[in-house]
Image (spheres, coloured by chain):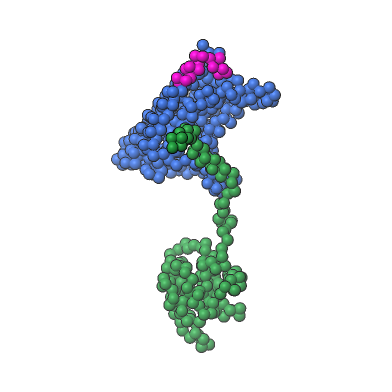
Chain colours: A blue, B green
Amino acid sequence: MIEQLLLIGTIAIKILVIVVVLLLSVAYLTYIERKVIGYMQMRIGPNRVGPFGLTQPFADVIKLLNKEIIIPTMSNRFLFIIAPVVSIGTALAGWAVIPFDKKMVLANINAGVLYVFALSSLGVYGVLIAGWASNSKYALFGALRAAAQSISYEIAMGFALIGVMMAAGSLNFNAIIAAQSGGFWHWYWLPLLPLFIVYWISGVAETNRAPFDVAEGESEIVAGFHVEYSGTVFALFFLAEYANMILISTLAAIMFMGGWLSPFQGIPYLESFFAWVPGLVWLLAKLSFFVFCYLWFRATFPRYRYDQIMRLGWKVLIPVTIVWIVVLALAIHFQLAPWFTEMK
Amino acid sequence: MNMQRLIQYIKSFAFWDLLLGLKLTGRLLFATKITIQYPEEKTPTSPRFRGLHALRRYPNGEERCIACKLCEAVCPALAITIEAEPRVDGSRRTTLYEVDLFKCVYCGFCEESCPVDSIILTRFNDYHMENRGENILTKDKLLAIGDKYEKSITADRVEDAEYR
């Protein structure tokens, strides 16, 4: 009995640590986003609250928490409130299976990829429910766009993940990382390059970020699915979006960039020189790069038109993944060195 | 022709245009920032800048304005109101000189028309009002602004002298 309680206690503490760290990184991601995009537009971004504007995220959070939650008269109250909870819940739950280091994983389940994929699809329900429950035209437009977009891109993303499963022969994240060991050129980004690119594009689309942010569509439909939201419930949507960005980046790092593996593996001198660096640091470095790419894309690309998004998803990304899965199957069958030598 | 289309096709699959865009923003990330930190830093203004109004005085303290009402006549926005009476010593002076800042379009015609360089537009453009009615600059306020900024006004005149 006591052992069970202890187990539950440690798990709860682990969850707490992950969530707190995640929320802090989300807070600072908003700051970094504003800074990076500002710099790319030759501005300097927030710099008034605290040194270099470093306490800006806290000012924003306090402001949002103090604001009134306005519930539109004609809306469905229950669904209106439940929608952001669905969004944030799925965004946080996905982190349960992410391995931060060789032993640092909350739930080392066998079907980790499947679990994350299922949750990221569920997250769209938050957007859909929000758009429908608001009983507002713009919100409904946003929700419809989000639905169509995520259906299209989930297929491409799923195919890209199938490629990873085929290559690693497992759905377990740690097994996928282990299968990539052997240094920079052994990671899956190279043999699965088209799938990697497809995964990344669909990942950006899946999180409704620029240039695929038609669901939010600031300049066309105001804020899309969350026009009617204010205060804390809006903050939840915001948190979910950014947590999802980090999650997609982490998955990209794990499945295509070797997760917590050191990039110097197999290089005689550098490997021992960097041996003391914990795997967590490598993972953080890799995922930071991908998160930076999110911001970089947002600062660079104009929003895709709706029909262009559909064309890209159905006519380009899905055919590319299917072709590459065939190529990959052949490569695995003939045990192409150096990636697929030990598989049978 | 076909060759060009092929090249175009390959380029689009290699994200050529997107990479060019990313290169641009990537370079700008490290470029010198052009932001001016407004309250601490300000953009340079010309000595001819047409900002807040002021009435000037002669060095002996006598107000310059002789109530000729040329500025009132020339003002395209009818922002200036003047009433005048002979002063005790017999000289013609204004009893009322008001500029409505909400009406004023800062064209500078009053300054141009003034024969004694009395009404002028200073280079100060960041001022505000907190209460209703403060948009009307009375004679006292205008003279006070003139007294406060006389140094910079004179300096601006000197700098611009050869073009007048």
Residue furthest to the bottom in view is B90
Above or below B16: residue B62: below
Residue A255 place in picture, x, y as percent: 52, 24
Q: Measuring 44% from the left and 30% from the top, which residue is drawn there?
A: A202
Q: Is residue A338 magenta?
A: yes
Quarter the C terminus of chain B occupies? bottom right
The number of discs equals: 0
Above or below A176: residue A59: below
In this orientation, does residue A127 appear? no
Q: Measuring 51% from the left and 30% from the top, which residue is drawn there?
A: A249
Question: Which residue is more in the foreground, A318 or A227?
Answer: A318
In this orientation, does residue B35 appear? yes
Residue B88 place in picture, x, y as percent: 51, 87
Question: Which residue is more in the foreground, A246 or A230?
Answer: A246
Question: Which residue is more in the foreground, B7 or A147?
Answer: B7
In the image, A18: left or right of A272?
Answer: left
Residue furthest to the left in view is A74
What span is in magenta? A325-341
Above or below B81: residue A180: above
Residue A238 place in picture, x, y as percent: 45, 37
Residue A297 place in picture, x, y as percent: 49, 38
Q: Measuring 41% from the left and 33% from the top, which residue is drawn there?
A: A312
Q: Is residue A52 magenta?
A: no
Q: Measuring 57% from the left and 80% from the top, which residue is drawn there?
A: B62
Quarter the N terminus of chain B occupies? top left
Above or below A270: residue A307: below
